Image (cartoon, rainbow, N blue to C red):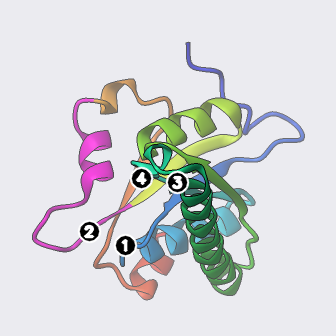
Amino acid sequence: MIPTRQSREPGHRRKFLVVVDDTPECDRAVYYAARRAAGTEGGVVMLGVLELEGVNQQWLGVADLMRAEAHEEMEARLAKYTARARQVAGVTPECVIREGTKAEAIAALIHEDRDIAILVLAAGTGKEGPGPLVTSLAGAHAARFPIPVTIVPGALTDADLDAMA
């Protein structure tokens, strides 16, 4: 069962969820979500997902080192995008780091934080298509997804996004 969103109840506010990764279009999603949050008195949650395939197959010391390095890299990436959200919209996002697959981490966070009301993704501009997450959520899973998904075209400029946000 999908928990009811609380973002419109007293003491709550609508949050925009952005999945932070190392793709060039990630900035477009962060920019749009921050501008929308600022314009609607909402918040932004940035999710960094560590897909640590094979880590558990390593020796304990090696696995711990790989996990620590991945956390440090993600913390640095989240800090970069937190600064970007503050710069463009005066918004300070909440940052969350999870391990596992992106789909599982997104679903779990949406289930846990009932103020999250919109997932913001950016579509890639390369020959490979819009990206695996956009393809997955826009395809077979779209009808069962618990919140609306906004897909920001990766080629839009700051000015384009300002006009829409």
The amino acid sitting under disc 1 is Thr
Quadrant of image for the N terminus: top right
Q: Residue at x 61, y 57 (%)?
A: 61
Choose mark 4 or mark 1, whichever is in front: 1
The amino acid sitting under disc 2 is Gly
Which residue is at the front of the view, 35 or 49?
Answer: 49
For marks 1 and 2, the one nearer the N-term is: 1
Numbered label attached to residue 49 = 3
| x, y percent for residue 120 | 47, 56
For marks 4 and 2, the one nearer the N-term is: 2
| x, y percent for residue 11 | 89, 41
Q: CA distance from mark 3 to mark 1?
A: 13 Å
> To which residue does mark 1 refer?
23
Q: Is residue 62 left or right of residue 54?
A: right
> To which residue does mark 4 refer?
150
Q: Residue at x 44, y 87 (%)?
A: 159
Do residues under tags 3 and 1 come within 8 Å of each other at their CB atoms? no
Which stretch is magenta? Answer: 122-140
